[in-house]
Amino acid sequence: MIKVATLSDVPPGTGRQVDAGGRVVALFNVSGTIYAIGGACTHRGGPLGEGELDETVVTCPLHGAEFDVTTGQVVGPPAEQSVPAYKVVVDGEDISVDVS
């Protein structure tokens, strides 16, 4: 597990791009639950952590591909491949992600 952020870094309804041991990860806070998926859109590498979050779907800021932040599944084009979903552990204020 790699500590990547604190709860105050990711307020409810927002996302954030973080580095987890050299891997780009997008964190999202959906109604108090933290999710982590691969941070690079599979279409053209856009920063998913900077995309707009609508409930559990993030829209890539570059070309509008949509991903489910709970699973990493692509739910809207132009991306065709899903991104990985990572296990998240919240300990107090600390958010850690398992990217192994």
Image (tube, rainbow, N blue to C red):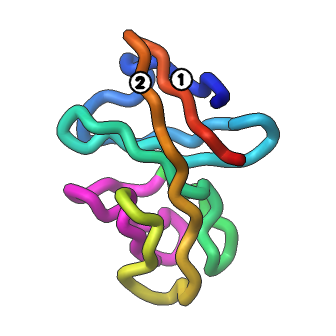
Regarding residue 58, the answer to whether it shows in the image is: yes
Q: Could you say which is closer to the camera, residue 8 or residue 73?
A: 73
Q: Position of residue 76 (x, y in %)?
A: 38, 84
On screen, residue 17 versus residue 99, left or right, reads left
On screen, residue 39 versus residue 64, left or right, reads right
Q: Residues within 10 Å of mark 1 (few under 14, many from 20)?
A: many
Instruction: Residue 90: give its label.
Output: 2
Which residue is drawn at the image coordinates 44% and 22% (left, top)? 9
What's the residue type where badge 2 is placed? Val
On screen, residue 4 versus residue 91, left or right, reads right
Regarding residue 49, the answer to whether it shows in the image is: no
Helix, strand, or loop for circle 2? strand
Q: Position of residue 89 (x, y in %)?
A: 46, 30
**Height in image: 18 above or below 23?**
above
Q: Residues within 10 Å of mark 2 (few under 14, many from 20)?
A: some
On screen, residue 12 versus residue 94, left or right, reads left
Please tell me in which quadrant of the rendered image residue 92 appears: top left
Q: Position of residue 10 (x, y in %)?
A: 39, 29
**Height in image: 92 above or below 37?**
above
**CA gap, disc 1 to disc 2?**
10 Å
- Looking at marks 1 and 2 on the same chain, the residue that comes earlier in the sequence is marked by 1
Report if residue 59 lies within the magenta region: yes
Q: Position of residue 43 (x, y in %)?
A: 62, 80
Instruction: Residue 5: give its label.
Output: 1
Q: Could you say which is closer to the camera, residue 56 or residue 46?
A: 56
Which residue is drawn at the image coordinates 41% and 24% (left, top)? 90
Report if residue 15 lies within the magenta region: no
Which residue is drawn at the image coordinates 54% and 84% (left, top)? 79
**Height in image: 78 above or below 41?**
below
Read off the magenta span.
51-69
Check the picture and name the quadrant holding the N terminus: top right
